[in-house]
Amino acid sequence: MKLKVWHLVVSIVLVGGIGRCEDFDDALARARETAQRHRYAETIEILSPFADSDNPEIKYITTAEIGRAYFHLGRYKPANRAFREAVAIHPEKPETAIYLEASSYLIGDTQQAYLIFEELLRSGARDLYLAVTLPGSRRFLAEPEVQSLLAEFAAPLEVDVREAGAMGVRLGESHDSVIESLEAASADPSARTLTAEAGPAVIWAFAFDTQQHLTEIVLYAGNLLDYTPYRIRFAAGIDWTATPAAAIAAWGPPASIRTNSDNSLIVDWDFGTHNLRMTFGQPGNSRPPDLPEGAAMIRSLHLAAGPLPP
């Protein structure tokens, strides 16, 4: 990712003695410990002597950590200055850029925030968890410029409920075939479940039986919408904005409809060879501009080769 929104010149000088690095490692460990205990003023005090280091990596880590400490203290202007320095050294690191975007927005530099968010999306960033959970997220997401950018860079996630497929794979495929199609990496090749997350939020899961054939696909549509640019698109011309009435019109009468304890609506279809469950509820961080107030939208989708859980 290349952010071209600052006119800063950084002179990188690879110097610094071994003893200095050892001092920094010790200071960084202590600073991170104080940050974990929410003693952010101490974090800043410990790391400040290293903020002007000639070693670019030490300077990057220091300014990024100091920026986060100021950010958590609600001191967004010094946080913004620190993140500018950090991003000038490593513009390719999305997390630091997201913090700069958030601090820019919170100090009123909305155009800077929009430019950074656009560059993040343009770079192919798919995990926007931090961007939409930091302070001011709901106000930021409600901005017409942000909604326009999300629409422009939306990544379609194709689902065919009648053919029991999503994201280019179908129920019954082998574990290896699914990994190849998804271009996924698994730390455990024998794992019975493959998952993907945006931050700590699970956005989809693929489950396999003992013979390593795909038996379940679960898409957490609410998390996809709230924390990523992914937008579900169905073969029947229905998309992520579908209401329960639109889904029933597309796929016919459901096998069952019931209300959950959280007032979400659970709708099941039986297609003979497989089953579909869609859960509808209130929008989370994002909502379609034309969605009527109080209307429900898709929060999760579950395709299964066998019976659905109760």
Image (tube, grey):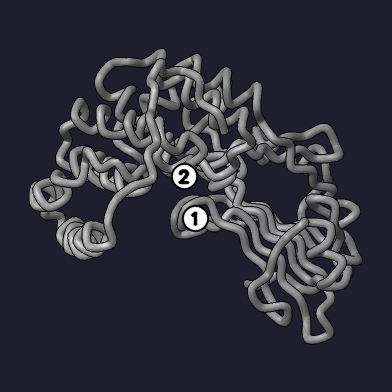
Going from N to C along the chain, the mark reached first, 1 or 2, is 2
Q: Position of residue 172 (x, y in %)?
A: 88, 70
Element on which disc 2 rests: loop
Is residue 50 shown left or right of residue 2? left
Whether residue 256 is visible to the viewer of this picture, yes or no, is no
Q: Which residue is mark 1?
A: 201
* Residue for point 14% across, 44% down: 48
Q: Position of residue 45 (x, y in %)?
A: 9, 48
- Label drawn at residue 129: 2
- Nearer to us in this view, 250 or 175: 175
* Residue for point 33% across, 45% down: 55
Q: Disc 1 or disc 2, which is closer to the eye?
A: 2
Q: Position of residue 250 (x, y in %)?
A: 82, 39
Q: Residue furthest bottom?
A: 210
- Nearer to us in this view, 298 or 69: 69
- Nearer to us in this view, 205 or 272: 205
* Residue for point 64% across, 73% down: 187
Residue count near mark 1 (Cα–Cα under 10 Å), binned few <14, some 14–19, many ≥20: some
Quadrant that contains the C terminus: bottom right
Please determine whether, in this image, residue 69 is positioned above or below residue 286.
below
Whether residue 207 is visible to the viewer of this picture, yes or no, is yes
* Residue for point 84% across, 57% down: 181
